[in-house]
Amino acid sequence: MNGTIRVGNLFGIPFYIHPSWFLVLGLVTWSYSNGLAAQFPQLSGGLALSLGLMTALLLFASVVAHELGHSFVAIRQGIDVKSITLFIFGGLASLEKESKTPGEAFWVAIAGPLVSLLLCGILTVIGVATSVSGAAAAILGVLASVNLALALFNLIPGLPLDGGNILKALVWKVTGNPYKGVTFASRVGQVFGWVAIASGVLPLILFGSAANFWNLIIGFFLLQNAGNAAQFARVQEKLTGLTAEDAVTPDSPIISADLSLRQFADEQIMREHRWYRFLVTDNEGQLVGAMTANDLRTIPTTQWSETQVKEVMRPIAESTTVQFDQPLLEVVQLLEQQKLSALPVIRDNGVLVGILEKAAIIQLLQSKSQLNPA
């Protein structure tokens, strides 16, 4: 999964760590251990390092709690959470699909910051209401302030941050169009990205200071992800209202189960060089299997004339087909998830409509873009 390492499950949700996380863990551990050693000279080097590591792990636990906030609300809405991943910029909960309404999208987006604010409040109360002192009090203060910063940073109203998803939900509510919400929130996210880049570059140019170098990295992160979100929203909008049948290839590679292997070889393999895999139908036009050129090799050529395709074909599982009226956007997501380049399209009674190729969807999008340029 993009180079990530699976480390287990959290409440049934697959939990991954990106290798970049270990770099941040080391830097945070080193930074906080040095800070504790300077603030409390009585601490030994080993103890300061251990406390620094514990603080870093608790900080990342706060990030996980933030992502679990999003996840639990999504699950209550019937949305599966595919994974939670920790990486260099924090955490990411990957949801199976979007919320159905702007109100539901709002609550999924705001749940994470609310969890961070709640943790900040709890840690602050513990620090004030108890007799904790010394290094323990300092660690509590750091955890509280980081959770506050995590909530406030994520509330910046630009994608891909939580605030951007909140803004998307609000624009969706006002306009009735979720894609306009994504587009607007993406543009705001790009503005914040440029501001972050400028705040990192200007001190470097004017004063030779790299103190805000982290802002530069965050700015590029915001720019890239906001741009990707806007591009994906444009694709989604163009696919809205289209079904699988709209993208079926007109000259789909369909052959009859009663065809002899000799006829198949002469009429399809020798004459048609575009297709490698052919869909097989029975006399009623129902999909019954698939046939490839390689399957011919399993039968001696002397037997091709008396052997029919249905004796050699491979069956097709219903799970690898799509219904003709299935939204094209869902089909695209299915192709991506299963890493497929094509899927058979059938009707309710199993009758084959044709094959749907990823390339045909791209051509359909390009034709719609030419007819309706943005």
Image (cartoon, rainbow, N blue to C red):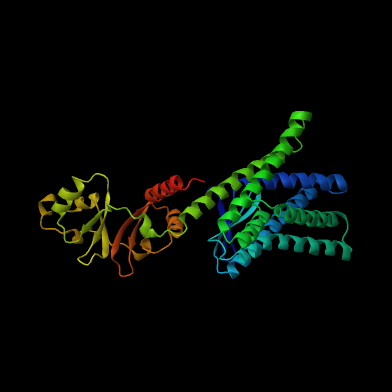
Which residue is painted at 66% across and 53% down in the image? 161
Residue 227 location (% of width, % of height): 58, 45
Q: Relative to the observer, which residue lies in front, 20 or 79?
A: 79
Q: In this view, does 165 lie to the left or right of 44?
A: left
- In the image, residue 350 above or below residue 155: below
Q: Is residue 295 left or right of residue 235?
A: left
- In the image, residue 254 above or below residue 282: above
Badge count: 0
Which residue is painted at 43% across and 46% down in the image? 366
Q: In this view, does 61 lie to the left or right of 318?
A: right
Question: Farthest residue in the front direction?
Answer: 371
Residue 32 location (% of width, % of height): 78, 47
Q: Relative to the observer, which residue lies in front, 318 or 186?
A: 186
Residue 345 location (% of width, % of height): 34, 60
> Residue 322: which quarter of the image?
bottom left
Which residue is painted at 13% across and 50% down in the image? 301
Q: Is residue 88 visible?
A: no
- In the image, residue 219 above or below residue 344: above
Residue 108 location (% of width, % of height): 63, 63
Q: Can residue 326 be seen in this view?
A: yes
Q: In this view, does 224 lie to the left or right of 365?
A: right
Q: Relative to the observer, which residue lies in front, 283 or 247?
A: 247
